[in-house]
Image (tube, coloured by chain):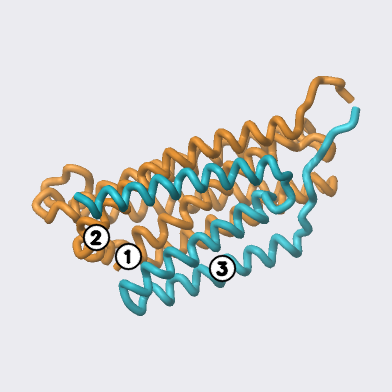
Amino acid sequence: MSEAHRDYQGAKIGMWLFLFTEFMLFGGLFISYASYRAIYPAQFHHASAELDVFLGVANTLILLTSSLFVAASITAVQKGRKNLALMLLALTIAFGAWFLVNKYVEWGAHIRQGVYPNGPLLLKRPSGEILFFGLYYVMTGLHGLHVLAGALLLAFMLVLLAKDRIRQDDYVKLENSGLYWHLVDVIWIFLLPLFYLAA
Amino acid sequence: MEHEQGHLIEYRTLLKVWAALVVLTGLLVAVSRISAAHAAWAMLTISPLKAALVIYFFMHLKYEGLLLKTMVFTALFTFLTFIGLMFVDISFR
């Protein structure tokens, strides 16, 4: 066993500090959403009706389940059950990909209807609706990038786990990657009611 | 070399938290369909509760020390202050 310096608490605190910056990044967007919704309540309400509630809820369940998988994969590593942990991590990544496919279908449908940032059809509509869809694309887009980044990070952890670089006695990397994945889930928990259920 | 390691959460506990999250999601959707006012209240109560479950159990915050808990609540308090100030700004324009 290597005697390299390790600082479990330090590694975790560092990750949480990074998560705070992510939280504030989305926080600024949540604040702009709240302020514009306070100014244009009826138009936000109206625009929200165009979003597909079924896809929004399905994606919520997908992310919640993927969060369960990554949390369970950490428990599996702690119990020394490597193969189970590998399988759970692979499932987490697959669910992340499924989420992105749904997002692609959803955005594709809006774009075909001419609802996209600066789209001529969208620009003819009231300013509150333009703002709603602007925020929708920026916030779900930024969130989607985080899902992609999280899935890539977890794929990297999968390789480290397979190579025994993540083990029962040293798994803080996996724990921190899991924290990132959960943060992405927490943000989606708020995006669902703000965009899909506001009608 | 001794290492401090994380707390182990049993699969059963994780599964219960997941089930609670699914039920709360269903409740959120159902209540949101009643009226706009219901939707707003559901968003302000059920969503933070769901987030708290994820942060407390999936992210292991329940089992962390006072330092990390204080850090998280400080960040949350800072953000809520920003939101409060923003609404004050809007209402006095």
Residue A136: tell me if it is visible: no
Gap in Å between the C-alphas at discs 2 and 3? 26 Å
Mark on residue A198?
1
Mark on residue B67?
none
Relative to A120, is A82 on the left or the right? right
Instruction: Pinpoint residue A36: horizontal percent, then vertical percent.
Output: 25, 52
Front residue of this view, candidates B81 and A32: B81
Circle 2 residue:
A44
Q: Is residue A26 above or below residue A15?
A: below
Circle 3 residue:
B22
Front residue of this view, candidates A199 and A35: A35
Determine contact: label 2, label 1, CB under 8 Å: yes
> Secondary structure under badge 1?
loop
Residue B50: tell me if it is visible: yes
Residue at image point 43% right, 45% down? A143
Of the residues shown, which amino acid type is indicated by label 1? Ala
Q: Is residue A189 above or below residue B27?
A: above
Relative to A183, is A156 on the left or the right? right
Label 2 chain ID: A
Relative to B13, is A61 on the left or the right? left
Front residue of this view, candidates B16 and A88: B16
Which chain, by letter, is cyan? B
Of badges 3 and 1, the one in the foreground is 1
Instruction: Pinpoint residue A153: horizontal percent, then vertical percent.
Output: 59, 36
- Which one is earlier in the sequence, the residue at label 2 or at label 1? 2
Same chain check for tags 2 and 3: no
Same chain check for tags 3 and 1: no
Q: Is residue A63 above or below residue A145?
A: below
Q: Residue furthest bottom?
A: B34
Quadrant into which the C terminus of chain A falls: bottom left
